[in-house]
Image (cartoon, rainbow, N blue to C red):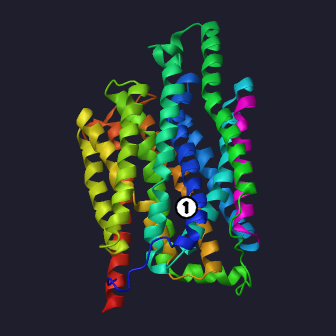
Amino acid sequence: MTQQEKVPVVSKKVVIPFILITSLFGLWGFANAVTDPMVQAFKKVLELSNSQAAWVQMAFYGGYFCMALPAALFVRKYSYKVGVLIGLVLYAVGALLFYPAAITEQFWFFCLGLYVLTFGLAFLETTANPYILAMGDPRTATQRLNLAQAFNPVGSILGLLVAQQFVLQKLQSDDIANYSALEEAKKVLIRTSDLMVIRDPYVILGLVILAVLVLVSISKMPQKKGDGITDSLGETFAKLKANSTYTLGVSSQVLYVGAQIMCWTYIYQYAEAIGMSSDTAANYQFIAFILFFFGRALGTYLLQFFPSGKLLMLYALFAIFATIGVIFIEGIFGLYCLVAITLFMSIMFPTIYGIALEGMSEEESKIGAAGLVMAIVGGALMPKLQGMLIDLGGFGVNDIKILGVSEVNFSFMLPMLCFVFIAFYGFRVNKKALVIIK
């Protein structure tokens, strides 16, 4: 792009709508970050195995898969603003369900709350991402989405601080070396207290979301609709299926989200293997989120100079090298490598998203966006599989050795394979772009 052709990432006439929609990115970042440590929290409090505790992520990311397409069909027919309002309502209801869940002390009830909560997040993401892409020149669409997504880790950092300061540090079960060996009466008291601790951030979050709901409802936003739908739903699906850049993009997104959630969720189990407590491990996840924010800001800048496919490939290659360190370097330096992965994951979601939808009509992109949001189901499936790998030798995290390393180290083979596929996707997209230029 020459200097004469250079266009603003966000034009002045859409600054206010851009800011309003971008604020939503922090909301789901908060929910993601505050939920990741809950896998370890529920494991301790309710005495679950690693794979059982992974149902937290199954419920959370499974909600995205189930609601993304209905949300896209709704947004296709009605306005973006209505889609946002419905998303906020479902978000608040899911968070407030933690109150009765804590009273019943039933794990499935907590999972139900997370499931409903992510119905709301599916609406928000299906609405916000394509809306941001459409807010300006197509040539800066991927850069614009990376800019908006840079506010996602801001919410993640806040969510992690809440999880660390108001949940992990207050869990009594985490302070007892042999919690399972306690008398049942003592365990009942501790369990009740700890579940209340887990409940409170979500209930407060639900009340905050209700306040945001009121704010959005009274704000003026462009009532952009899917006017004049030219293709039937079947025709749109056929076009998407024939678009290899899109279909491979969906596969890449499934693997990226799976890798992200595995690296963020099992940082606690990795830390446990080297004798580190959960609240101390949260400090490392906090650093990872700072790197995530920095990496996304840097990526947004670099997209001015690098084709999106090439930059995606480079970030994925660095992620592969960092993951090899996680697997084969045991101890604190392996943990450092695990933290470093987040820096290289930072641009993957918005960049894959932008590449996959590039060149589509508005109506086609709305349905295409649903597929990319449904791809978030990777965050439900892959952590469960990793939990099963960690449980191969028992409910601990370093019961057996595989290829000379503990099973928790070996389990990071899964995110490494995900990054290999993403690197291939970036290479393929970049090669295709070079052919078009020639």
Please give the residue where the numbered disc 1 appears in the rendered image. Answer: 375
Q: Residue furthest front?
A: 12
* Quadrant where the image shows the C terminus: bottom left
Out of 237 and 79, give the one closest to the viewer: 79
Q: Which picture quadrant has residue 375?
A: bottom right
Q: Main secondary structure of the magenta part?
A: helix
Q: Residue 294 lies in magenta, yes or no?
A: no
**Helix, strand or loop at mark 1:** helix
Observer able to see residue 374: no
Relative depth, front residue between 211 and 159: 211
Q: In the rendering, at what x and y percent does residue 145 appear?
A: 48, 66
- The residue segment tinted magenta is 78-101
Above or below, comparing residue 374 to residue 200 in the picture: below
Q: Is residue 236 visible?
A: yes
Q: List x then y, in percent, for residue 403.
A: 26, 42
Residue occupying image coordinates x 51% and y 83% = 359
The amino acid pointed to by label 1 is Ala
Above or below 65: residue 394: above
Horizontal side, residue 423 vs residue 195: left or right: left
Where is residue 211 shown, x and y percent of the image?
71, 44
In this view, 151 is above or below 10: above
